[in-house]
Amino acid sequence: MNSSKHLRVSALAFLLVCALAAPPLRAQTANENLASDVERLVLLYRLSDSKVGVVALDLRTGTEIVARNATEALIPASNAKLLTTAAALDCLGADFEFVTTLYRTGPINGDGVIEGDLVVKGAGDPNISGRFFDGNVCAVFEKWAGNLRKLGVKRIGGDIVLDDTIFDREFVHPAWPDEQLAGWYCAPVSALVFNDSCVDITVKASAVLDAPAQVVLAPPTEYVTIKNKVTTTSKKAAHSIALNRKPGANTIEIRGEFWQKADALVESVTVENPTMYFGAVLRETLARQGIECAGRVRCADAPFDAAQAGVEAVARSRSSLAATIEVANKRSQNLYAEQLLKRMGWQKHGTGSFANGSKVVGEFLEGLDCGKDNFSISDGSGLSRLNRASAEHLVGVLRWALGEEARAEIMRNSLSVSGVDGTLAKRMTDPLRKGRVLGKTGYISGVSTLSGYVLDANGSPAVAFSVLINWRNPKSAPKPFQDSFCGLLVSWVDRNPRTQEPTPGGESEGK
């Protein structure tokens, strides 16, 4: 779309939203007006040949105020994370914590040597990274090293053993795009993951023209091999960088030309075998802290028995479900949703797999009164194009989340705020909508989705809504449609105040 056409469409949309903010002049109900206004938006944003599922529910009365293709099963993209995180609240509980434990299997002799192995028992925690430690990706491992030094440990006589057995070792979902597996959003899944299963690569210009660009890794690890084929250039137009890792290998190739005046480029690239990456960086961190390992890093063949004689816990890392759900939804971090999915699969069905986790989400949805069971759960993040859900499912889950105070707070805090933060920081920034929409966005090719809550003037959820759009027309404008629809809902809420308490969410029969 050229700029003049874009301005005309934007102006029309603005005038439409402003007109709808005034009291209706026609002899129709407010809800009838809202339904016809939605159809006008469908035409305005060229979505007539798209699949558009829309539902909005007045939470204060429990009545549906608008519905369009409400029960049609569509690809939800990252709105699938709402299903996953809600199911996790139901399955694991709002106060759940991931606990990763470091054990020694033998005594510490007089020379400071552990006469046995160092064992890490994984719990599926996605938070062992720098995200909550001021960017220090090795902070947890450095803390563990400090605990060992306090015990007088200078050397590990045996191996570093990685118990990732609560999950299977299908690290990557088969439906994820093969050509994108090096991207951070395709991060591999394991019961032991470190730094989002990625290595962070910073590329900077060299001080000398035509010399290789500078490359810095975080963490500083030998687990990956870097082939630096980037040169420094004085030509701004020549600035172009590409990073690639082929599946099955940990060699990352960086190609291109880096303009000498450009800011540093930081990219996250996934690794092969996240469990072994965890162990390799743990070993390297311990060595930097003065603790060597005589043996090797290896994966456990069977679940580690911490109750056996001579075993002692020497360190633990904990993180909350609330923090995990906030990263999954507000940042739309795929790995976090997949970690939750597999943890639920282990919790209820004995093995953490994509299939078992998807089964738990399906069981959760079946227990809710939110329409037909015409859904298909393939993964936890929505990256798979095999996922299907309806707008009615999404609204039902959002309503359920409000039915208990602790889970309601977690879900609300996990959603992006229009015009303020997360994936909605740059959307709906105008005075009408800014701060009035809590939402979860979703996007994969041909799919754009937005579901969440519209707040009343007091900041309480007044409407739960979902907009699922599967389109083919490249001239379609799904995001402007969603944003204009939210404007309609904000205006509707302001024109239709209620004094009733919000209706409680439906409870899952499985809990």
Image (cartoon, rainbow, N blue to C red):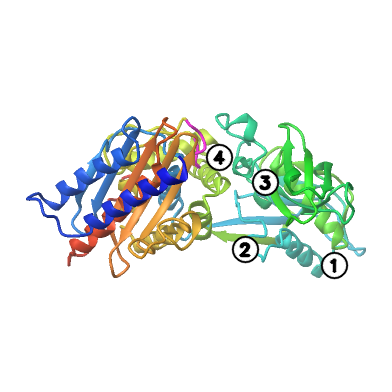
In front of the other: label 4 or label 3? 3
Give percent across and percent down for residue 102: 71, 56
Q: Amino acid at mark 4?
A: Gly
Query: Badge 1: how crowded within 10 Å, few (<14), some, or many (20+)?
Result: some
Mark before the other along the chain sequence, 1 or 3: 1
Mark sitting on residue 197: 3
Residue name at image x 40 percent, y 37 percent? 476
Mark 2, residues whose alpha carbon is within 10 Å: few (<14), some, or many (≥20)?
few
Pair 1/2: label in front: 2
Residues at circles 4 and 1 in contact by the CB criterion of under 8 Å: no
Which residue appears at 36% of the width and 53% of the height?
452
| Residue located beneath label 1 in the image | 152
- Return the residue at label 4: 352
Q: Locate residue 195, reporting x and y percent.
A: 68, 52
Is residue 176 shown left or right of residue 3?
right
SS label for mark 1: loop
Query: Residue 299: horizontal and vertical position, in percent?
Result: 74, 41
Residue type, mark 3 in image: Ser
